[in-house]
Amino acid sequence: MNTRNAYALRARQTRQVAPFGLGAAHRPLPVPEGVPPHPACATLPERVCRHALADRGENARLNAREEAVKGRFDAIVPLLKAISALQHHTDFVERAQLLARQQLGYALPEDILENAWSNGLDVKALYSRCVFQALLLSAEEYASDYRSKNGSWQDLHSFFLDCGFHAVDISPCADGRLKGLLPYILRLPSTPFIRRKAYAGAMFDIETDVRQWMAVELSRYREGVPNFAEAGTRYLKIAVYHFSSSRPHHEGCAAHGSDDSAAIDAGLRRLLEFRQAIENSFCCGAGTDILLIGVDTDTDAIRVHVPDEEGNLSASRYVDNAALYAASLGYGENEARIAVHQAILDAGASRPHEGMRRLVANLLINNLSQIEYVAEYYGGRYPDIGHAERYISVGDGFEEVQMRNVAYYAHLQTLEEGLSDMDIGIKIFRHLMGKRGLPVPIAIHFRYDARVPGSRARAVSRTRGVEEAIRSRYADLEAAGLLACHLTVQDMPAGSMIEEIIDEDHAG
Ligand SMILES: [Zn+2]
């Protein structure tokens, strides 16, 4: 049984009952034995709460996207099973294409179908072609949506600038459960203003980030983008750790041994070191703000560690958004907004600057919708379904497909650099794919900067080099025809076209 569908089904059934929340007294109902009550909505799983600030229209839109992307991958195996059963019919190619168009929305490679009569249907080749097609279609859908919203970022950019920030640099943990951090958990669009780069345990590389800081500041001095250096705005660095409210000692951050305090302390230390590095290297006035956010990967509820007036953070001073959701259920919109702002003031020993307060309030309010999203579509907590990734993403990763558990990511420039991540990924996929005799789909993707002479050629050569290294390291899979690599490069600006690199030696 598909656990995820079961949750969705149950969530749909619960909608027939009047929801708790607006104007209703909050009356907790008994929860099944062994399951701790949901931290935000105590009436789950019987009924979903309704918070005045949750955006249900946006939740429905995001759910449709999640269903479409995951559905596109999940439809492949049933389709291949169905056409495999037809391969000895005289009109096989026509019937297979008809089914593919109906169930996948695109046609299959004609050459593979036409050769089926003599060599049998090459299911492995079809499978990998379909996985990469699903990936490209999902990315293209996102990119066209992104391009169509081009103008609406201006509001977001103005909002950040109004809050006193000219750049936002976010480093979450690389855990697959945080892949939906921007579009889902924090409800922030991908824009040139926000940089996101994941590291195991959120342990971002200080040197890399200082270089990023320098690039941003230089662009302000030279071009006035996004504003001139005299503007007095700040660079905001955010680290995002994660924890599990239902199984704190087992399902927390693997990089910190599921020890939440270790994850928090390490994140805090790294942020302070980053700020210190900027101050030591570029003297005073080199304004940076730091912020630490925690995500409960069971419910997607966040904690925001609120800075004090000096901009300092503490492990114990934070706003717990699940608690805030529960406390402000039944409030009207204005009352709920006031509760959010009050929670921020109550969290700190002293008040952070006004822009920081506005930003934190915005993130908390956005996340109230995500808490309700998980409540509505997953019964409050993501079911523990283990690894269900559809492909391994190697290199820079696709900005376009940011969704929980869709891909296993190995961020690297050379295979040596990300060897342990890659070995873990291959191990997971040996288990996921091996038992079905299907190849491991590996999408190798690098970005280049078209403004820099030779950058594209170097990205293409890096992509090919990583492919070669993967094929030689996992030689047993390669020999068995169980490695399917897909090579792409992409220009830097968000929403740029994804360019496939066709390697004649490995085509098909
Ligand atoms: Zn982690």
Image (cartoon, helix red, strand yellow):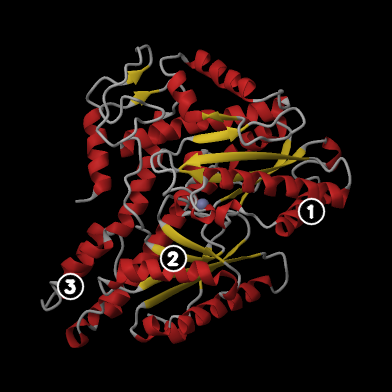
Query: Assess mark 3: CB under 8 A from ligand 1?
Result: no
Q: Secondary structure at mark 3?
A: helix
* Neighbours of disc 3 within 10 Å: few (<14), some (14-19), many (20+): some
* Residue at 71%, 64% in the rendered image: 451
Q: Which residue is mark 3?
A: 84
First in residue order: circle 3 vs circle 1: 3
- The picture places residue 375, in percent across and down from the top left corner, at 35, 33
Q: Which residue is mark 2?
A: 392
First in residue order: circle 3 vs circle 2: 3
- The picture places residue 168, in percent across and down from the top left corner, at 67, 43
Q: Which residue is mark 1?
A: 214
Q: Closer to the observer: label 3 or label 2?
A: 2
Q: Quadrant of residue 158?
A: top right
Tell me the kind of residue under disc 3.
Answer: Ser
- Residue 444 visible here: no
- The picture places residue 11, in percent across and down from the top left corner, at 26, 34
Q: Is residue 199 above or below residue 428?
A: above
Tell me the kind of residue under disc 2.
Answer: Ile
Which quarter of the rendered picture does the C terminus lie within? bottom left
- Residue 317 visible here: yes
Tell me the kind of residue under disc 1.
Answer: Met
For this view, does 188 lie left or right of residue 128? right
Mark-to-mark CA distance, 3 and 1: 56 Å
* Most foreground residue, 318 or 369: 318
Q: Closer to the observer: label 3 or label 1?
A: 1
Mark-to-mark CA distance, 3 and 2: 26 Å
Q: Is residue 112 above or below residue 28?
A: below
- Tag on residue 269? none
* Residue at 35%, 43% in the rendered image: 382
Q: Secondary structure at mark 1?
A: helix
* Residue at 78%, 41% in the rendered image: 227
* Most foreground residue, 486 or 390: 390
